[in-house]
Image (cartoon, helix red, strand yellow):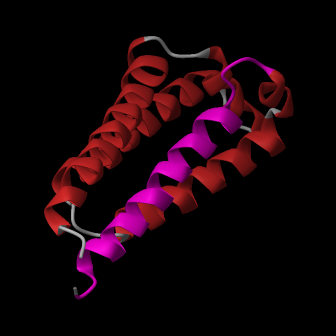
Amino acid sequence: MMDKQRLEKPLQLIQMTLAVLWIYQGVIPKILFQSNAEINIWQAMGVELDMAKICVALSGLVEIMFGCTFLMWQRTALIHQLNILGLTGLLLLIMITDPLQLSTAFNPVVMNIAMMVLSIVAIQLLKLRNSPL
């Protein structure tokens, strides 16, 4: 018989890790030090430079808010399902707008897949925790 309390620590670690990663990605390359790669993505979609910079900052705010949801809702698989869906969409966006990014070190493939796997493991742990003994 599995002690459901033992599942709490790995779940908390996953939640905290995903929160930190999303918040970091929102703050550092999008708000504090606007990455040229981020600006180029918006420009590739037809947005002018000044507006692209605003869009990068706004997308950073959205990422920060999404990261905070991992801290607020720790008992639901929905946030992890949204994480997987969003990361898949962002990866497809990069493939379309700037495929050369996929060949650089520490590229979106590495980060997105790692974050998706964390969510897959979290969903599995949540199912175990919620299952009857």
Q: In this view, does 119 lie to the left or right of 133?
A: right
Please give the name of the residue rendered at 32% of the width and 32% of the height, measured from the top-left corner. Answer: 20
Residue 105 sits in quarter: top right
Which residues lie in the magenta part?
Answer: 104-132
Q: Residue 21: percent from the left, percent from the top?
A: 40, 33
Image quadrant holding the C terminus, namely bottom left
Q: Residue 97: percent from the left, percent from the top?
A: 79, 39
Please give the name of the residue rendered at 77% of the width and 19% of the height, measured from the top-left corner. Answer: 104
Residue 47 visible in the displayed image: no
Front position in the image: 62 or 85: 85
Q: Residue 117: percent from the left, percent from the top?
A: 54, 51
Identity of the residue furthest to the top in this view: 33
Q: In this view, does 40 lie to the left or right of 28?
A: right
Residue 71 visible in the displayed image: yes
Q: Does the magenta stretch include residue 110?
A: yes
Q: In this view, does 1 lie to the left or right of 18?
A: left
Image quadrant holding the N terminus, namely bottom left
Front position in the image: 54 or 9: 9
Residue 109 sits in quarter: top right
Q: Is residue 20 above or below residue 75?
A: above
Please give the name of the residue rendered at 42% of the width and 36% of the height, measured from the top-left corner. Answer: 58
Please give the name of the residue rendered at 70% of the width and 25% of the height, measured from the top-left corner. Answer: 40
Identity of the residue furthest to the bottom in this view: 132
Q: Is residue 68 above or below residue 33?
A: below
Q: In this view, does 22 lie above or below 124?
A: above
Front position in the image: 86 or 112: 112
Q: Does the magenta stretch include residue 77?
A: no
Prevailing secondary structure of the magenta residues: helix
Q: Residue 59: percent from the left, percent from the top?
A: 46, 38
